[in-house]
Image (cartoon, rainbow, N blue to C red):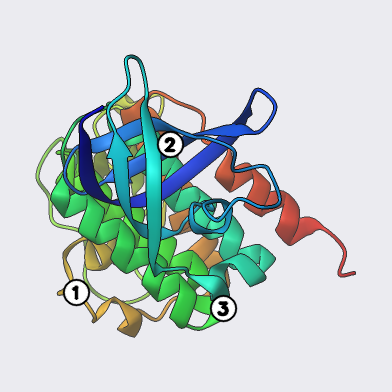
Amino acid sequence: MPVYKAEAIVLHQRALGESDRIVTLFTRENGKLRAVAKGVRRPTSRLGGRIEPFTHARLMLARGRTLDVIAQAEIVRAFGGVRKDLFRAAYAAYIVELVDRGLAERDRHEDVFLLAGDALEKLDRGRAEDAEIVTLWFGLRLAGLLGYQPETSACVECGRRLPRARGVAEHWAFSPPNGGALCPSCRPHDAQAMSVSCGVLGACEYLTTAPDGQWGRLRITPAQRAELGRLVQVHLEHRLEVRLRAPQVIKRLAEAPPA
Ligand SMILES: [Zn+2]
């Protein structure tokens, strides 16, 4: 069997037969692909701990007739901080779900690979309270790389610029079908428009366009962050034509009484 090397982020895995797993990988070289990890559920397997979800690994794969087989794995970044914390893990699951749903198999996207690794790194090393904003930043940047960046600097219907002053009380909205903002005059013509404050549309614009590394300067209230989270989720669900699972898990976690 011919073998090849790949650098990958592990998206998820599921059991196969007695002791194997099917692992969904997002590789730098070949995009998303599924591969078999043989014998990994045996306690003696050396491979098992190296292909956990979210792990960034260097792999050796053997071409198979249907699915390729993971022959060797070496961890590049384990992202242990993500795995140890329930909330960080839930946001990491959001990131990998977006990659999984957003890309077709064998569709090479090195820019998305680098972005996903960067976002997981920020989740792993950053402050726990920034986990949500890191994930929303990732979702917006991913949308841009896949060609459906939301337009939130101006009304998508008439082109009117979003007011820049803080605390403007105008009733703007976001249109999922149009993928952008609607001004108070245009919003009544869109039955699916959802109300969004000007501050949140501005925050969305900032996260989408701010130079990398400066997104952390964004100052928004918890209520605005929740509103931004809904906007990003609705936009991505509309574009990807899916219902995302991870945001629902995060919502349930946030609502659960502290242990
Ligand atoms: Zn308008």
Nearest the viewer among 127 and 46 is: 46
Task: Name which residue type carries label 3.
Answer: Ala
Dot 1 or dot 3, earlier in sequence: 3
As drawn, 253 above or below 3: below
Where is mark 3, residue-wise? 128
Which residue ends up furthest to the left in the rendered image? 159
Dot 3 or dot 2, earlier in sequence: 2
Q: Secondary structure at mark 3?
A: helix
Task: Confirm or deny contact between disc 1 and disc 2 (CB under 8 A).
Answer: no
Where is mark 2, residue-wise? 24
Residue drawn at 46 percent across, 41 percent down:
97
Q: Secondary structure at mark 2?
A: strand
Residue 210 falls left or right of residue 82? left
If the image is split into quadrants, where does the N terminus sit?
top left
Task: Confirm or deny contact between disc 1 and disc 3 (CB under 8 A).
Answer: no
Q: Position of residue 69 (x, y in %)?
A: 39, 32
Question: Is residue 199 visible in the rendered structure shown here?
Answer: no
Task: Name which residue type carries label 1.
Answer: Asp
Nearest the viewer among 245 and 232 is: 245
Label 2 Cα neighbours within 10 Å, binned few <14 / some 14-19 / many ≥20: many
